[in-house]
Image (tube, rainbow, N blue to C red):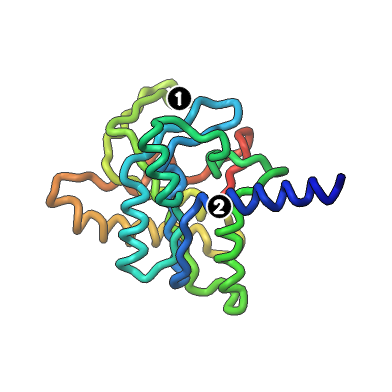
């Protein structure tokens, strides 16, 4: 009956909650949603983006930031099995009707609620992803493009928000500051920082709902 169904739903949410590792720190939130093999509805299985969980954890620890990554148990299990668990879905492809069941969505919502009393002041979200060594394709103008950068700075989501006046300017300033700081560290090691990558960090209309 209804009671049994409720119990089952609660159990599913509890089990899914254990699959992520969260840490409450400051307003800065570091996430790495693609650190393991993941299911994508109507899409091929997404392979792990190597070292993204390690980077997220290291950055969060060094900066006293909040954190959300797949749990160590899930990372070890996935590395051993080399395949996606049926329960582990890509949070960026979570359908709207099941978004509330996503441990990632709940973790980000909880982080936002922690800072509601200060109007979100000091809250920033850095989402760590991997990238291919070289990306090529064809643009709308028919011309081929090539992107062989090493570190992309994608602020497309912030550019596209436009909740407050000046959001676009904030996005450009943030990208410029990050580019300058990262180049200072990476350039001498031969790595190229790209302030305007092809993948901007924002999924437009006509694709699955982008969660956290």
Task: Determine the secondary structure under disc 1.
Answer: loop
Side (left or right) of 209 relative to 180:
right
- Say above or below: 179 vs 207: below
Tell me the quarter of the image containing the N terminus. Answer: top right
Can residue 39 be spotted in the picture? Answer: yes
Q: What residue is pinned by disc 2?
A: 104
Task: Determine the secondary structure under disc 2.
Answer: helix
Side (left or right) of 129 relative to 110:
left
Percent position of residue 140, x then y: 48, 26
The residue lying toward the viewer, choosing from 99 and 117, is 99
Residue extending farthest left: 188
Mark carried by residue 141: 1
Mark carried by residue 16: none
Residue at 42%, 59% (x, y): give it: 30
Percent position of residue 181, x then y: 26, 61
**Could you say which quadrant of the image residue 49 lies in?**
top left
Residue extending farthest top: 142
The residue lying toward the viewer, choosing from 205 and 85, is 85
Chain-order first, disc 2 or disc 1: 2
């Amino acid at each position: 009956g209804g009671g049994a169904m409720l119990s089952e739903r609660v159990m599913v949410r509890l089990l899914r909650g254990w699959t992520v590792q969260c840490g409450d720190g400051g307003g800065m939130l570091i996430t790495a949603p693609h650190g393991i093999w993941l299911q994508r509805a109507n899409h091929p299985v997404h392979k792990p983006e190597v070292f993204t969980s390690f980077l997220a954890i290291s950055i969060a620890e060094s900066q006293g930031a909040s954190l959300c990554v797949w749990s160590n148990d899930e990372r070890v299990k996935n590395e051993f099995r080399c395949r996606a668990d049926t329960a582990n879905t890509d949070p960026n492809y979570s359908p709207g009707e099941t978004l509330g069941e996503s441990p990632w969505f709940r973790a980000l919502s909880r982080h936002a609620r922690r800072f509601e009393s200060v109007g979100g002041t000091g809250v920033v979200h850095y989402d760590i992803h991997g990238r291919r060594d070289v990306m090529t394709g064809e643009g709308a103008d028919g011309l081929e493009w090539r992107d062989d950068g090493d570190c992309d700075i994608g602020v497309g989501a912030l550019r596209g928000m436009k909740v407050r006046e000046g959001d676009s300017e904030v996005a450009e300033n943030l990208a410029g500051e990050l580019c300058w700081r990262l180049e200072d560290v990476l350039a001498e090691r031969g790595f190229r920082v790209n302030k305007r990558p092809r993948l901007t960090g924002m999924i437009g209309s006509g694709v699955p709902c982008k969660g956290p």
